[in-house]
Image (spheres, coloured by chain):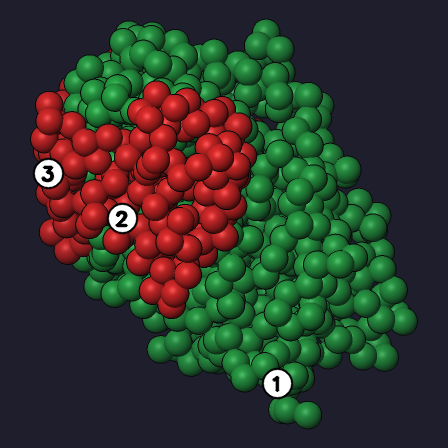
């Protein structure tokens, strides 16, 4: 038996790091357990000649392919979209594109506005100060004045347009549609100890320059200086409870594989939309036979990805290719509901700059654009460095049949049951994707691109893991309340994307972190009666 | 098979032959084929977790060819290669990727594409700023987002 800590956070990724930093000023004893370790930028793919090849191996976005010791397997056979994540200090912020839009105000009121799903119990205004705070700490580059989103003031200037951005901007202007330089967490100037971007171009599988914000280099150094303890290579198996149905602590495996127990007065779960329901469902007991915090039966249900409809083609001019961050522009032209389109809600267009030669060769060969034999070289020179593309990030609505459960057979290296995903794309989303593909083809036609290719959905595109422990005021229809506390276990909090009621049509990391900071702030305001 | 080579001698020969069929040498572009010794050595040295599916694909190819691929006349060799490609599957996709990823990081090939044979870090690249006046028509638009 160990001495209890005041707050135990499970997971050191986007949300866990933000909560640790926020709670640090309470001077409580805060401990974070993370199943992964600290990353070493000297070994990141962009430091070696095999930088592209590693995306198919030890830096694959899929934990099933990557299979590092820190990863856990996921049975996603019954899903057209495969789960991608990363397990380390920094979590999936180690391996993300750094595209950093926020949910829109309308995203929190989908029932009121569009009569689908449910409204959130909080709104954009409640999160606004936390968006700002998070932008400052993560370090966001962007340009104020975008008519497509509410006013915000990114602390750094935007990424350059480059060749690809300019080509895309001209094409979108020909159509009279909206575009704007994307908000990103790529540092465009030296920022808070981080060196500015030097266009390594290979941003997604971790940034060797440290220009891309990941929480191991943003929140964690500050939180640790403020006294937060972080233990790595500690995989939590289950949360235990006491006779008062309060969380008592966690059972975990330490770096040597030894089973340990850590007592805690408050437990905060920050394991993402798949890891969190997995942990709760693995935390069964006589008092909680169906998993912890699951009296509603909704733990694991309403899983939302953002199905990506990707369209690309090839232009005569040379693009930026892999020689710049892949993030570029966004368009909000089709974000807000217009029922004449045949669906409700909408999507963001995320524009890309291109890919490197190996990825181009592998993708083009698979699409049948790149022949074997005599015609190979001429075809490759026409394709390589000439790709221009965009993706529709489509809002996924919550549907209970889309869910995370425990696989009856598959287990991780510690013998803990692995998650199983059952997911299919809803009708509204499917119509939205078709709309996005058609509009994307118009953009590429305006750019005079040829050899148009479509990936819909992107197979390894399950980056955004949302909705599996939703927040709400009704304990029968939600897992946590409007400030992140479990309805069932009054010292248990959930702070990651699991609590999303709906998904919006944007990359969610900014909003996940704003929600986490909001919940931490609520906890601090209620410390005297946190468990009432 | 040996500690340095996860393929049998026959499989190594077939890998070299199919790699050359996928990407032959080109005098026009002044590049070697994927059957070049240095590129083959890279493939064998870095097969790693791909060794299993590559062996599977080579075994399938051997069944189709009914003889070492290199021993076939050019027309028959090409026919077998096309048959293997049409058959597809995860193992063939892995074999193809291994050939492509080693070929397109070879110094001679990378230079022939007008690129520098180096990793992205630490030198990086230069990104031109672009013409920000393109944004003028968008700046003139009214707010598009719904207040809620």
Percent coordinates x, y for residue B104 in the rendering: 24, 40
Q: Which residue is mark 1?
A: A258
Q: SS at mark 3? A: helix
Q: Residue B119 bears which disc, if any?
A: none
Image-quadrant location for residue B28: top left
For disc 3, the chain is B
State whether residue A463 appears in this view.
Answer: no
Q: Which residue is mark 3?
A: B111
- Comparing A274 with A342, the one in front is A274
Q: Nearer the viewer, mark 1 or mark 2?
A: 2
Q: Residue at x 64, y 91 (%)?
A: A2
Q: Which chain is red?
A: B
- Comparing A340 with A255, the one in front is A255
Q: Residue at x 78, y 75 (%)?
A: A241
In the picture, the quarter occupied by the N terminus of chain A is: bottom right
Q: Nearer the viewer, mark 3 or mark 1?
A: 3
Q: A346 left or right of A324?
A: right
For disc 2, the chain is B
Q: Earlier in the sequence, mark 3 or mark 2?
A: 2
Residues at marks 1 and 2 on the same chain: no
In the picture, the quarter occupied by the C terminus of chain A is: bottom right
Q: A44 left or right of A407?
A: left
Q: SS at mark 2? A: helix
Cα distance in 3D space between marks 3 and 1? 51 Å
Q: A31 left or right of A186?
A: right
State whether residue B21 appears in this view.
Answer: yes
Q: SS at mark 1? A: loop
Q: Which residue is mark 2?
A: B40
């Amino acid at each position: 038996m160990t001495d209890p800590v005041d707050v135990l956070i499970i997971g050191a990724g986007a949300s866990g790091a933000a909560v640790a930093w926020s709670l640090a000023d309470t001077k409580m004893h805060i401990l974070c357990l993370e199943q992964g370790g600290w990353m070493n930028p000297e070994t990141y793919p962009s430091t070696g000649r095999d930088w592209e090849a590693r995306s198919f191996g030890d830096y694959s976005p899929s934990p099933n392919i990557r299979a590092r010791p820190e990863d856990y397997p996921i049975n996603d056979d019954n899903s057209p979209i495969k789960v991608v994540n990363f397990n380390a200090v920094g979590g999936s912020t180690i391996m993300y594109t750094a595209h950093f839009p926020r949910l829109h105000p309308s995203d929190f009121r989908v029932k009121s506005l569009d009569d689908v799903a449910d409204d959130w119990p909080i709104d954009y205004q409640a999160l606004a100060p936390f968006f700002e705070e998070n932008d400052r700490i993560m370090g966001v580059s962007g340009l104020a004045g975008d008519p497509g989103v509410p006013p915000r003031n990114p602390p750094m200037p935007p990424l350059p347009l480059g060749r690809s951005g300019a080509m895309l901007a001209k094409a979108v202007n020909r159509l009279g549609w909206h575009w704007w330089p994307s908000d990103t967490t790529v540092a465009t100037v030296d920022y808070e100890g981080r060196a500015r971007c030097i266009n390594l171009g290979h941003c997604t599988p971790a940034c060797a320059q440290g220009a891309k914000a990941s929480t191991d280099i943003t929140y964690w150094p500050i939180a640790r200086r403020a006294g937060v303890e972080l233990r790595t290579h500690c995989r939590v198996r289950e949360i235990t409870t006491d006779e008062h149905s309060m969380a008592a602590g966690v059972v975990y495996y330490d770096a040597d594989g030894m089973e340990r127990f850590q007592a805690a007065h408050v437990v905060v779960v920050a394991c993402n939309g798949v890891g969190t329901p997995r942990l709760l469902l693995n935390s069964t007991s006589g008092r909680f036979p169906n998993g912890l915090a699951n009296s509603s039966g909704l733990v694991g249900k309403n899983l939302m990805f953002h199905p990506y409809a990707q369209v690309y083609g090839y232009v005569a001019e040379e693009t930026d290719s892999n020689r710049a961050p892949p993030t570029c522009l966004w368009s909000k032209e089709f974000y807000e509901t217009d029922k004449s389109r045949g669906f409700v809600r909408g999507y963001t267009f995320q524009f890309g700059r291109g890919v490197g030669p190996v990825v181009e060769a592998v993708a083009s060969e698979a699409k049948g654009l790149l022949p074997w034999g005599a015609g190979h070289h001429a075809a490759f020179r026409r394709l390589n460095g000439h790709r221009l593309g965009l993706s529709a990030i489509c809002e996924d609505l919550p549907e209970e049949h889309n869910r995370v459960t425990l696989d009856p057979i598959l287990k991780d290296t510690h013998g803990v049951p692995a998650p199983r995903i059952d997911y299919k794309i809803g009708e509204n989303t499917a119509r939205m994707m078709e709309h996005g593909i058609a509009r994307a083809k118009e953009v590429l036609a305006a750019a005079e691109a040829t050899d148009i290719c479509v990936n819909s959905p992107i197979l390894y595109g399950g980056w955004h893991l949302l909705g599996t422990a939703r927040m709400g005021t009704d304990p029968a229809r939600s897992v946590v309340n409007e400030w992140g506390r479990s309805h069932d276990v009054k010292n248990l909090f959930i702070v990651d994307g699991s609590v999303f009621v709906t998904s919006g049509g944007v990359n969610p990391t900014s909003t996940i972190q704003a929600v986490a900071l909001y919940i931490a702030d609520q906890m601090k305001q209620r410390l005297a009666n946190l468990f009432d | 098979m040996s500690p340095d080579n996860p393929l049998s001698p026959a499989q190594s020969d077939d890998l070299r032959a199919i790699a050359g069929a996928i990407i032959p040498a080109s005098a026009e572009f002044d590049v070697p084929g994927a059957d070049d010794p240095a590129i083959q050595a890279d493939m064998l040295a870095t097969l790693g977790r791909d060794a299993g599916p590559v062996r599977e694909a080579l075994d399938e190819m051997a069944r189709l060819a009914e003889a070492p691929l290199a021993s076939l006349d050019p027309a028959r060799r090409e026919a077998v290669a096309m048959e293997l490609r049409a058959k597809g599957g995860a193992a063939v996709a892995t074999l193809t990727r291994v050939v492509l990823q080693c070929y397109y990081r070879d110094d001679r090939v990378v230079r022939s594409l007008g690129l520098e044979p180096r990793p992205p870090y630490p030198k990086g690249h230069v990104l031109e700023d672009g013409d920000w006046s393109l944004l003028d028509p968008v700046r003139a638009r009214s707010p598009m987002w719904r207040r809620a």
